[in-house]
Image: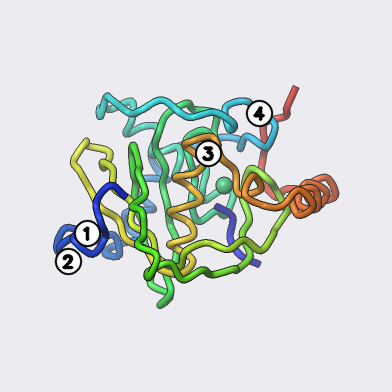
Amino acid sequence: MAQQQETRSTDETAEDEFIVDTEDCEAREQAYRERGTARPITVVGNAVLHRECADVTEFGPELAALVDDMFASQRAAEGVGLAANQIGVDSKVFVYDCPDDDGLRHVGVVCNPVLDELPPERRNLDDSNEGCLSVPTAYASLARPDVAVVRGQDAEGKPIVVRGSGYFARCLQHETDHLYGRLYIDRLSKRERKDALRQMEEGTPRYETVPND
Ligand SMILES: [Zn+2]
């Protein structure tokens, strides 16, 4: 996701089941990105962004190298979240480096993410602005729940549960959507979508993108 200019109920999840992703953020993020190489970002219209990605089944060195490249690419494009198909890889993995409601930084990796269904009483919608590295220079207001819980696996295949609030909740939902072939502009009205695409046409990204044929 660009920076800003349930099968099980979340309430049944014990506090210690949630992964701690707020410690040593700077060192962890730096280690990933220094091992990796930044790659150009795919943009709306590229087929890899518009279909569901393949499940991750191998948690070996190839995945680790992909995650490194994703952190390098995320940093180069100044993003707060990045899905594998945004660098052209058909694989259900996303990375994030994103602040939450309290300004606390979260850094991590999720493979095969599935969002918890929130009970209706927990669905407080937040209509902040959202942007996407794959829709460069465009922003639009989009209502989403202000908390999110994602279940999946880390890069070693260990089951994890990630919880986010505020902007980080938005990020978890946005990145999970990507891996199912959905962009945030697909959730906008026809008119708002058109407006976002016009913003993209008029702007120039500050990072390298993959040209569409
Ligand atoms: Zn995005």
Amino acid type assigned to the residue bearing label 2 in the image: Glu
Looking at the picture, how far across and down is residue 147, in whole percent?
A: 40, 65
Mark 1, ligand 1, within 8 Å: the answer is no
* Mark earlier in primary sequence (4, 1): 1
Mark 2, ligand 1, within 8 Å: the answer is no
Circle 2 residue: 15
Circles 3 and 1 in contact, beta carbons < 8 Å: no
Circles 4 and 3 in contact, beta carbons < 8 Å: no
* Mark earlier in primary sequence (2, 4): 2
Circles 3 and 2 in contact, beta carbons < 8 Å: no
**Image quadrant in which you'd find residue 98:** bottom left
Looking at the picture, how far across and down is residue 205, in whole percent?
A: 72, 48
Mark 4, ligand 1, within 8 Å: the answer is no
Dot 4 surroundings within 10 Å: few (below 14), some, or many (20 or more)?
some
Circle 4 residue: 46
- Could you tell me which secondary element the residue under label 4 belongs to? loop
Inter-mark Cα distance, 4 to 1: 34 Å
Display colour scheme: rainbow
Label annotation for residue 38: 3
Inter-mark Cα distance, 2 to 4: 40 Å
Nearer the camera: disc 3 or disc 2: 2
Dot 3 surroundings within 10 Å: few (below 14), some, or many (20 or more)?
some
Looking at the picture, how far across and down is residue 155, in whole percent?
A: 27, 38
- The correct choice, above or below, for 40 with respect to 123 in the image is above
Inter-mark Cα distance, 1 to 2: 6 Å
Circle 1 residue: 18
**Between residues 92 and 184, which one lies in front from this camera angle?**
184
- Could you tell me which secondary element the residue under label 2 belongs to? helix
Circles 1 and 2 in contact, beta carbons < 8 Å: yes
Amino acid type assigned to the residue bearing label 1 in the image: Phe
